[in-house]
Image: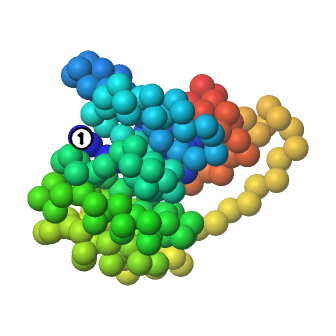
Amino acid sequence: MGLVLAPTRELATQINATIEPMAKAMGLNTTVIYGGISQARQEKALRAGVDIVIACPGRLEDLIRQRILTLEAVEITVLDEADHMADLGFLPVVKKLMDMTPTQGQRLLFSATLDNGVDKLVNRYLSNPLTHSVDDPQAAVTTMEHHVLVVNDQTVKKQLIVELASGAGRRVLFMRTKHHAASLPRL
């Protein structure tokens, strides 16, 4: 069995939407487990048999405590957004869950940072971990240029966004909504 731990139901659902088509193509079943809803559908999916569980730590712990599920057969465990789980206070539960998985299984951890206890997870549960960093940890923030442009005309604003987004080099554009961000390539 594969286990993916995610800090929020939105991320767990998003991960499942990505994994499920690939899993189905390989004859594998997935399910998503998170709190805030009736667990009846989740129990039904688990009884039907599941190969990959994508779960939020709290509800997963509840189902284990109720003896609806065990983690004894987990071969691969993925901790996604471990830093966000730390920020939400999930690390004690994550440690309990990790302790329930077989030690010989493969474990992967993804995190934007290795602080707030995430480094302790790395040291305790990963063997020979590889670290990938986008930027040098000593990179100076002062090397970044910040610009604020106030534009009231929508046509001019779209032209400006296209110009800024299509330039050379790295840049960050903040959009008001996910819809605006998704429509950016169509501008």
Q: In which quarter of the image is residue 133?
A: bottom left
Camera-side residue: 110 or 27? 27
Q: Where is residue 122 in the image (x, y as percent from the top left)?
A: 28, 71
The N terminus, quarter of image: top left
Q: Where is residue 156 in the image (x, y as percent from the top left)?
A: 78, 37
Note whether residue 155 is visible: yes
Q: Is residue 165 left or right of residue 114?
A: right
Note whether residue 76 is visible: no
**Amino acid at the residue labelled 1:** Met
Above or below residue 88? Residue 68 is above
Identified at 38% across, 81% down, the residue is 138
Q: Where is residue 106 in the image (x, y as percent from the top left)?
A: 17, 54
Identified at 80% across, 32% down, the residue is 155
Above or below residue 126? Residue 140 is below
Above or below residue 121? Residue 183 is above
Camera-side residue: 32 or 59? 59
Identified at 31% across, 37% down, the residue is 52
Identified at 48% across, 41% down, the residue is 33
The C terminus, quarter of image: top right
The residue carrying mark 1 is 1
Label 1 residue SS: loop
Q: Is residue 151 left or right of residue 40?
A: right
Q: In this view, does 36 lie to the left or right of 97?
A: right
Q: Position of residue 112 (x, y in %)?
A: 42, 64
